[in-house]
Image (tube, grey):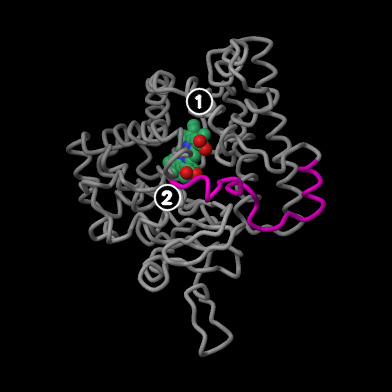
Amino acid sequence: MKTSGCPFHHAISDEFEPFDLTNPFPFYKKSREEQPVFFSEELGYYVVTKYDDVKEVFKDWKTFTSENAQSPFKPIAPKAKKLMEDQGLVGLSGLSGRIPPDHTRIRRIVSMAFNLARIKKLEPRIRELAIEMIDAFKNDGQAELVKQLTYDLPAYVIFMLLGVPKEDVKQVKSWAESRMLMTWGNLSEDDQVVHAENMVRYWNYCQELVTKRHENYSDDLPGDLVKLQQEGHEMTDREIAAICYSQLFAGHETTTSLMGNGIRELLLHPEAWEAIKAHPEMIPNAIEEVLRYSPSIVSWRRRSTQDSVIGGVEIPEGSNILLIMGSANRDDENFEGGDSFNIERKNAREHLSFGFGIHFCLGSPLAKLEFKVVLEELTKAIPNLRLKENQEFTFAPNTSFRAPNALEVEW
Ligand code: HEM
């Protein structure tokens, strides 16, 4: 814990450790109680921790633009920056960093292609994959579930959606990690160059996906987007590639995290595991509760386009704002006993883990479907699953993406 230099000056921001997500929840609670909107000198961001305030900011996209949502927290050193600028990667966003009217136009077209029918079509293949992956270890008596299940499964699914062949999965997955670290991590200058090179490879890969769909239609998301473009819907190849670039990232890290956090919480609360085992129909609400209690993304960003007020605190025009959904979701004023895990909670789905308003996550039905299938199959195949004792859970250092790096289980 950091201490303020001056013994008489004590602000909540001195205790804020933005890159340490091991257990940020006690700090969030303290902030909600003592100073729900504060300025973090370390980040240069106003930090917002109460539910109503976070929701208001999400709702008001005009005053609080999302254009900074994907920009790096730490300044990028010149060498890495040049690499990215040369490829048009600075400021590139699929949807979440765009604003109307571009956002409205592109989101409408993407929603036509990425619809419930496309997601439903994936379900049998998701189930096949889950069964195959669980079968591979179910007779071993133990497993590391991140490595053996939750890390690859959502990647395979997103690659099916995007029409990327199975043999590319490991490679593209590691490029996507570079993007996560570059934007939300705390890298040295040398590491930045390595990761910037990976991001360029990742971007080139996405552009190639689109070029190939022009040569040959295929029944996948980029194929449908190219088809819609050819039918007259206004969307450039670069915009389609940017959607693929962001889906590859948005669609797997976050879902891997949902499963890691979810299985961990369900096993830390064995009565919850027993309940979903006996009553699989409880799984959907259990997933909402996992999303509320232990969200994959604990914070997301906005920037104020004019002078404004959040929770009584004046926010000058041009300020960066960090919305802490991981805190908002546990606000006792909105969720009774917010710090307790209860898979029967009636209003669990009111969490803000997928954002709110015009940018509300487009992939939430897919993420929830994947985890539902995994839980259905896992509870059936290994009903007496439990966490190995005395394991220390570690979390990648960054501001936003929270999930255990490993999950050692036995049965
Ligand atoms: C548990 C898993 C997931 C979580 C926690 C999550 C969370 C989020 C959040 C917080 C946002 C920003 C909302 C805002 O700014 O108001 C977002 C946007 C988005 N997500 Fe997800 N997401 C998940 C899975 C997915 C998946 C599987 C996909 C796609 C396959 C996806 C695609 C998107 C897209 C395209 C946007 C941008 C929407 C827009 O700006 O209009 N997400 N998501």
Residue most extreme to the front: 307
Range covered by the magenta-colored residues? 59-85
Q: What residue did someone put label 1 on?
A: 108
Do the residues bearing badges 2 and 1 touch, measured as CB atoms within 8 Å?
A: no
Q: Looking at this rendering, what residue extends furthest in the bottom direction? A: 7
Q: Going 40% across and 18% down the picture, which residue do you hit?
A: 117
Q: Earlier in the sequence, mark 2 or mark 1?
A: 1
Relative placement, left or right, of 327 versus 379 is right
Q: Position of residue 172 (x, y in %)?
A: 63, 34
Examine the image and state in which quarter residue 49 appears: bottom left
Q: Position of residue 80 (x, y in %)?
A: 78, 49
Q: Amino acid at mark 2?
A: Leu
Look at 54% across and 55% down and name the residue there: 396
Label 1, residues with CA under 10 Å away: few <14, some 14-19, many ≥20: few
Name the foreground residue: 9 vs 217.
9
Q: In this rendering, which labeled residue sits more in front, label 2 or label 1?
A: 1
Relative to 154, 163 lies left or right: right
- The answer to whether residue 251 shows anywhere in this view is no
Give x and y (percent) for residue 113: 50, 20
Residue appearing at x 56%, y 33% in the figure? 103
- Work out which quarter of the rendered image holds the C terminus and state it: top left
Quickly name the residue at label 2: 407
**SS under mark 1:** helix
Ligand 1 within 8 A of label 2's CB?
no
Residue at disc 2, secondary structure: loop
Is 145 in the magenta?
no
